[in-house]
Amino acid sequence: MSERIPPLRRRMVARDPAEEHRVATPLELLFDLCFVAAVGQAAVQLHHGLAEGHFANVGIGYLMVFFAIWWAWMNFTWFASAYDTDDVPYRVLTLLQMAGVLVLAAGVSSAFRDYDFTIVTIGYVVMRVAMVAQWLRAAREHPEGRTCALRYAGGVAVVQVGWILRLALPHPWAEVGFAVLVLAELAVPAFAEHRTQTAWHPHHIAERYGLFTIIVLGEVVLAATASIQQDVADGGWSAELLEVGIGGLLMIFAMWWIYFKHSAVEHLRDSLRTALAWGYGHYFVFAAIAAVGSGLEVAIDSSAHKAHLSTVAAALAVATPLVIYLVTTGILHSRMADAGIATLVATVAGCVLLVVTALLADVLTISGAVLVMGIVMALLLAAGLVIQHTRAREPTR
């Protein structure tokens, strides 16, 4: 094995967006693993809250925490695609961001339990300050992109002051402040890049999002497996556990296949609006995938009579994130490819069947409902593949 020595320092200039063989780096993969630890903590708290029947509060808390995780991950990902130098200062600032997300992860339980976002905010601001430092370095060392980089640095820095001040706001102004600051965060990239876009690499971006999708799916596998293992240890194998296991595996496999059925590479650079819509839409993709894992755990608890909610509610804990996932991926794919009316009809039909199955959970039992929902996902995947291949064989006009 040849020795690869990272440079102590190199000038931070824009990467070539047409660079051949651009792939994710080992540092980016380590970065993702730290972030998925925070995703796992959020999913654990969602599971516990849903199992106790606290739908509204735990749902809002989950969406708030997940935004902090996803937004910090997304900002680093796009910056790295444009300016990754892989030198010592870059790696150290990336380490600081990894430390920040682990601090955030440590505060997830208090955010859900006590609605105390202090630790989450500290971890988030640490990550964002590191990002400001990266943008300031890019502004100094890459004159051609200085205006864009300074807009990023200034915008991110100002919003972080808002996050810190938000901690002093009482209810319900804290929630209002959160919504305003989310909009401010989302506006920064549009403000910074409305005239000149950074030199991010479309293939690299698509690969990074795909890899994180797989990692979050892996978190679902881990969560569901751990719950099944615990139930087996408590009472041994049962037909109900087998049904949940098969249904859950079908869901995970279908979600993976549906996501990678279309490529976004060719159209990501079409316009800034396309890139932002695709990037922002993945908030719902990632959050829904992780929530499916929590829903499967709730279903397992319900099957073992450990959950404090109705059978229908437990089934809806699985069906709801599946529907969100299907709707979001359907919209994202439609922006990147001519999906056609048949795909739209199939997606709507699949979502309706998932909800109807959940509403019939008292009749089907929770394990039976999960199995049927897994079959629905598999059938929807099969329908999508048939439609895709049929359209590919049609003569172009």
Image (spheres, rainbow, N blue to C red):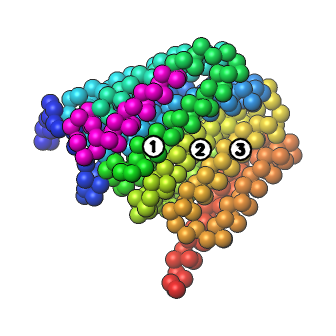
Q: Position of residue 128 (x, y in %)?
A: 42, 28
On the picture, is 106 further left or further right than 292? left
x 36%, y 51%: residue: 196
Nearer to us of marks 2 and 1 is 1
On the picture, is 222 further left or further right than 203? right
Main secondary-structure element of the magenta-colored stretch = helix
On the picture, is 104 further left or further right than 353? left
Give the crowd class for mark 2: few <14, some 14-19, many >=20 residues within 10 Å: many
x 28%, y 40%: residue: 146
Residue 292 versus residue 205 in the image, above or below: above
Q: Which residue is mark 3?
A: 320
Residue 311 versus residue 370 in the image, above or below: above
Kindly indicate whether the residue at mark 2 contacts the one at mark 3 (C-beta within 8 angstroms).
Answer: no
Give the spatial CA distance, label 1 vs label 3: 34 Å
Q: Amino acid at mark 2?
A: Phe
Give the crowd class for mark 3: few <14, some 14-19, many >=20 residues within 10 Å: some
Q: Position of residue 255 (x, y in %)?
A: 57, 51
Q: Amino acid at mark 1?
A: Phe
**Range of residues picked out in magenta:** 137-163
Give the quarter of the image for residue 165.
Answer: top right
Give the spatial CA distance, label 2 vs label 1: 23 Å
User: Which numbered dot is residue 228?
Assistant: none
Give the spatial CA distance, label 3 vs label 2: 12 Å
Q: Secondary structure at mark 2?
A: helix
Residue 74 visible in rendering: no
x 50%, y 32%: residue: 69
Total number of numbered discs in the rendering: 3
Mark closest to the chain's N terminus, 1 or 3? 1
Q: Position of residue 152 (x, y in %)?
A: 39, 37
Q: Which residue is mark 2?
A: 284
User: Which numbered dot is residue 191?
Assistant: 1
